[in-house]
Image (tube, rainbow, N blue to C red):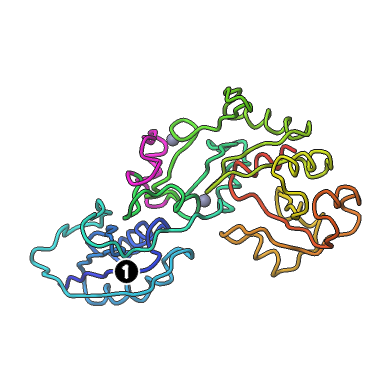
Amino acid sequence: MPARRITLRGRVQGCGVRPAIARLAAERGLAGSVWNSPRGVVVELLGSEDALIRFRETLPRALPAVAAVDGWEESEIDSDAFQPRDGFEIRASDREGEAAAIVPADLATCPSCLAEAADPTDRRFGYAFMTCTDCGPRYSIVRSMPYDRAATTMSPFAPCASCQAEYLDPRNRRFHSQTNACEACGPRLRLYEADGRQVAVDDAAFERAASAIASGRVLGVLGIGGYQLLVDATQPQAVRTLRERKGRYSKPLAILVADLADARRFAAIGPREAETLTSAANPIVVLERVTGALTPEQLDALVGPLDTLGVMLPSTALHQQLATRL
Ligand SMILES: [Zn+2]
Ligand SMILES: [Zn+2]
């Protein structure tokens, strides 16, 4: 029986490539293993020539949409010494050698994770730091490549039994998700007063943060990759306070909305705009305003004389929870 080694280069770490390959190999009845190396992702396969050909044909379609394979090397390897001869495994990363793999980008929380965060029956209901193999921080938390939990700022958080079970289940969306966590085992949401006192955690932190914004205060949010300063966009005085503190008197400010339906209340959104707003890069999109949605005074504070409006959807469950509570 032939044995092969395939090395995939490009954006192939931190985006669910190893679990996708493990699933496909198991479906095709191939034995072998997959692991991250500094050069990319390495797969070793043992099986019939037919099964290997079908694996190769279906692999591009089986990979997650956020993965981008730039190159592919394949070589025959010694099948007599091949291990394991049964089953397929995800092996520990190989950390030797020159780094060539692309550091994965941060990805906005995916629709499946946002739906769970909003579902009262889900065990992660209201959890601020939802992630899966399709979404979540990567670039902002990785300390070295290859991308593994131990090489990220998630390393101090040991997964609980429920999270570990998801991690080990090939049918689960969080199979081999390096950031897998929940409120029981992962990072918790904490709210601090301006003097540094911690005043609330988890759900109480959301409640208190939302009421601080509603009362016209400025909230600093440590999101993915940096801080954002949030105020109630419908309170011109709150917007002016933010401008004074930042020394930004005329730069237009964007609004954060809970979802696409909410965005349509404020701006004209066609299919292209919707696609851009909901993409994994989660950009601020400059849109044509819907007249009458905001008062002239509110608009003046936000964007001055411009007739466009910057709009963004929640980039994380944290932003989603805040936006829906306001
Ligand atoms: Zn997700
Ligand atoms: Zn957990």
Compared with 102, 152 (above or below) is above
Say if 238 sits above or below 54 in the image.
Answer: above
Q: Is residue 152 magenta?
A: yes
Query: Label 1: which residue?
Result: 8
Badge 1: few (under 14), some or many (20 or more) residues near its Cα, within 10 Å? Answer: many
Horizontal side of 205 relative to 74 (left or right) equals: right
Q: Residue at x 90, y 59 (%)?
A: 291
Residue situated in front as seen by the camera: 47 or 42: 42
Q: State the image coordinates of residue 194 (x, y, percent, origin top left).
A: 63, 28
> Compared with residue 156, is residue 77 higher up or lower down, i.e. above or below?
below
Quadrant for ligand 2 reads top left
Foreground of the two, 206 or 115: 206
Snapshot quadrant of residue 44: bottom left
Q: For this rendering, which residue is in front, 123 or 38?
A: 38
| Residue at screen point 83% across, 55% down | 304
Give, as a single range, the part of the protein colored magenta. 150-171
Q: Secondary structure at mark 1?
A: strand
